[in-house]
Image (cartoon, rainbow, N blue to C red):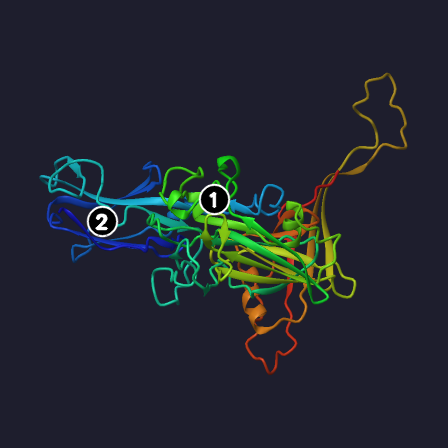
């Protein structure tokens, strides 16, 4: 074997991190020697090629963690999901990638060089040495460099179980650090995201988000129940999956298709699902109208499969309790959505007073009162003719929002809003992009002196209003 991969990044990982591969070769003493790393997408299309000389010990260390995020993004289309289903395949947040290694060298310091595939000694060809990992599934999140490892610790977020099964278990697999008990207004959106996969195509063991159970309560009594099955209508590339029917067992859809986003088998989209669990998302679905009907709180539970057409109600992949909020002291509040460390959306409402200050920058010019450019035989007196005029007015609206008092858990979680790279606010049924203007914030670290702790946040619309 020409190239030996001695270290590889984890197969399931957060892309905006230090993702390291280390390689070695017995040919590093050759003239003009360089290691080659090729990053490819799920269809084997080459995205980028990196060449690197061996370090003094002969090894090559490649960090693709600053390269992969160029080929990822963040999903926003699912904000108001519900009308077409409560399960939305990720389109941009996570994708399959393939990493291969090869080498190049010549016969002398002045000769041409040849590229070798890295698998068989002295065989030319494109880099092809992938080691034991045929593909990677990378999400547009980040690993804390102080976590104790290069790789993402997935044990809490990807915990595959036997499927179908009647076994009992309780997990918290949603990609969020949010409290599982939250409050929301009847028109609020709320989405979560979860891995929904068998990473290597197992037909019997998977993290299989088969359905979501909804239970609505009012005055202490259960007033509404519903189950939403995770299936793709008409083999959709956008909604649900990989099942196209709730009658299917996991074994029927377990095949991994790294180059396709269609349903009927595991795809890049179905591997990471967004789920709409907010009051307005469910209202959009037409199942229960949270704006018109009575409710105090509701539970949403992510369930596995027990058998064909049957939910395993003894097990829970995750569970959220949403309590009704009618505002605070008559304030409308501001609902924020931000990208968390896992590359998906968290939601929270700052329920107290909000303020707006509008700054205007006027760009003016002065015209002559006398019409020197007249086209007639006399200069007509015109009292309405302007002297000083504005040719442009820049409007800069700055908003300030205040949270209610926060628990320690809420404070630790919401602080991610301040350093998120992508933030929106909900304005009715519209999501507006904003920029956070605060350069610092105080964390809740002392429960004795910070018993009544709040956040105040200052922001501006990403697209400022324009003058006429």
> Residue 141: horizontal and vertical position, in percent?
44, 55
CA–CA distance in space, label 2 to label 1? 37 Å
Crowdedness of circle 1 by 10 Å Cα count: few (<14), some, many (20+)?
A: few
* Mark 2 or mark 1: whose residue is earlier in sequence: 2
Residue 418 visible within the image: no
Q: Residue furthest top?
A: 377
Q: Secondary structure at mark 2?
A: loop
State which quarter of the image contains the C terminus: top right
Q: Residue at x 64, y 74 (%)?
A: 453
Q: Which label is found at residue 221? A: none
Residue that appears at 71% across and 50% down? 289
Mark 2, other Cα within 10 Å: few <14 / some 14–19 / many ≥20: some
Question: In this picture, is 143 found above or below 444?
Answer: above
Instruction: From the image, tell me which residue sits under label 2.
Output: 131
Residue nearest the viewer, comparing 386 with 146: 146
Task: Determine the image quadrant of residue 118.
Answer: top left
- The residue beneath circle 1 is 247
- Image height of 432 relative to 222, above or below: above
Seen in the image, is 329 located left or right of residue 416? right
Left or right position of 72 against 220:
left
Left or right of residue 296, residue 321 in this image? left
2 vs 1, front mark? 1
Residue that sits furthest to the left in the current view: 107
419 vs 110, nearest the viewer: 419
Position of residue 455 in the picture relative to residue 309 (left or right): right
């Amino acid at each position: 074997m020409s190239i030996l991969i001695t270290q590889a990044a984890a197969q399931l990982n957060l892309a905006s991190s230090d993702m390291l591969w280390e390689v070695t070769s017995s040919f590093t003493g050759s003239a003009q020697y360089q290691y080659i790393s090729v990053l490819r997408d799920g269809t084997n299309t080459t995205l980028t090629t990196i060449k690197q000389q061996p370090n003094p010990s002969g090894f090559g260390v490649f960090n693709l963690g600053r390269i992969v995020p160029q080929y990822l993004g963040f999903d926003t289309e699912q904000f108001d999901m519900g009308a077409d289903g409560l399960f939305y395949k990720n389109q941009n947040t996570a994708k399959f990638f393939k990493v291969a290694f090869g080498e190049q060298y010549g016969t002398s310091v002045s000769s041409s060089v040849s590229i070798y595939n890295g698998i068989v000694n002295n065989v030319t060809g494109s880099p092809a040495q992938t080691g034991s990992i045929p593909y990677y599934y990378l999400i547009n999140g980040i690993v804390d460099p102080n976590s104790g490892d290069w790789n993402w610790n997935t044990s809490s977020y990807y915990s595959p179980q036997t499927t179908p099964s009647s076994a009992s278990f309780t997990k918290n697999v949603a990609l969020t650090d949010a409290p599982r008990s939250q409050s929301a207004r009847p028109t609020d959106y709320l989405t979560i995201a979860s891995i929904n996969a068998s990473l290597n195509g197992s037909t019997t063991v998977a993290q299989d988000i088969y359905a979501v159970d909804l239970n609505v309560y009012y005055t202490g009594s259960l007033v509404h129940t519903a189950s939403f099955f995770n299936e793709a209508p008409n083999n959709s590339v956008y909604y649900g999956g990989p099942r196209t029917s709730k009658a299917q067992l996991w074994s029927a859809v377990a095949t991994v298709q790294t180059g396709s986003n269609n349903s009927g088998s595991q795809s890049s989209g179905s591997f990471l699902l967004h789920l709409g669990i907010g009051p307005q998302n469910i209202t959009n679905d037409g199942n229960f109208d949270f704006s018109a009907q009575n409710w105090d709180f509701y539970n949403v539970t992510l369930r596995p499969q027990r058998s064909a057409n049957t939910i395993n109600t003894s097990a829970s992949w995750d569970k959220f309790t949403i309590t009704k909020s009618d505002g605070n002291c008559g304030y409308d509040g501001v609902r924020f959505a931000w990208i968390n460390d896992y590359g998906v959306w968290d939601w929270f409402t700052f329920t107290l007073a909000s303020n707006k200050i509008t700054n205007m920058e006027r760009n003016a010019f002065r015209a002559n009162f006398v019409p020197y450019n007249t086209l007639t035989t006399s200069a007509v007196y015109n009292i309405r003719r302007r002297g000083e005029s504005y040719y442009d007015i820049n409007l800069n609206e700055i908003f300030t929002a205040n949270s209610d008092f926060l628990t320690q858990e809420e404070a630790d979680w919401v602080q991610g809003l301040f350093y998120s790279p992508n933030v929106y606010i909900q304005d009715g049924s519209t999501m507006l992009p904003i920029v956070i203007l605060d350069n610092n914030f105080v964390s809740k670290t002392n429960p004795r002196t910070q018993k009544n702790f709040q956040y105040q946040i200052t922001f501006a619309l990403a697209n400022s209003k324009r003058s006429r």
